[in-house]
Image: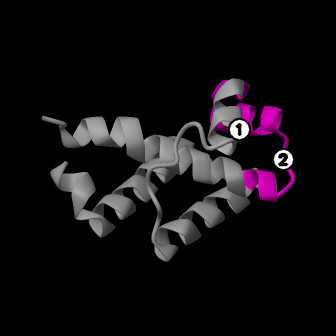
Amino acid sequence: MKLPCQMIVWDVLPAIRAAIAEELVNYGLSQQEIARELDMAPSAVSQYLSKKRGYRIVFDEDVKQSIRVLAEDIKADNVDDLAGRICRICKQLRSDEQQCIDG
């Protein structure tokens, strides 16, 4: 049995991080800068960008928009609570996708 929290850790959070990394690349940040901003290893950013990690979920447009806004705010150095912002995106996704709630 796959618990909903397992799905979040294994699929949802990596997909959100991958999408944020992609947006930040689009804004001209390097992998090193993205790793620093997201507090992760540069190798993790590389895996997200090469689709080796975090590719299993396709987001609805409203979730994509929330990710774009977060990436803009990260670029502008306008994020006080990154974890909280990512949690809100995760909750938004879970409210949109019943599979994330039910497992």
Quadrant for residue 88, please give it.
Answer: bottom left
Point out residue 8 in the picture as x, y percentages from the top left corner: 34, 42
Secondary structure beneath disc 1?
helix
Q: Which residues are magenta?
A: 24-42
Specify how the rendered protein is coloured: one colour
Task: Give the amino acid type for the residue marked by disc 1 in the picture.
Answer: Glu
Q: Judge by depth and name the residue closer to the eye, 50 or 92.
A: 50
Q: Judge by depth and name the residue closer to the eye, 52 or 4.
A: 52
Residue at 52% over, 43% down: 54
Farthest left residue in view: 1
Q: Judge by depth and name the residue closer to the eye, 30 or 73.
A: 30
Quadrant for residue 92, please give it.
Answer: bottom left
The number of callouts visible is: 2
Question: Circle 2 sits on which residue?
Answer: 29
Task: Give the amino acid type for the residue marked by disc 2 in the picture.
Answer: Leu
In this rendering, would 88 be left or right of 21? left
Point out residue 84 in the picture as x, y percentages from the top left corner: 46, 47
Quadrant for residue 5, please give it.
Answer: top left
Point out residue 24 in the picture as x, y percentages from the top left corner: 74, 52
Question: Which of marks 2 and 1 precedes in the sequence?
Answer: 2
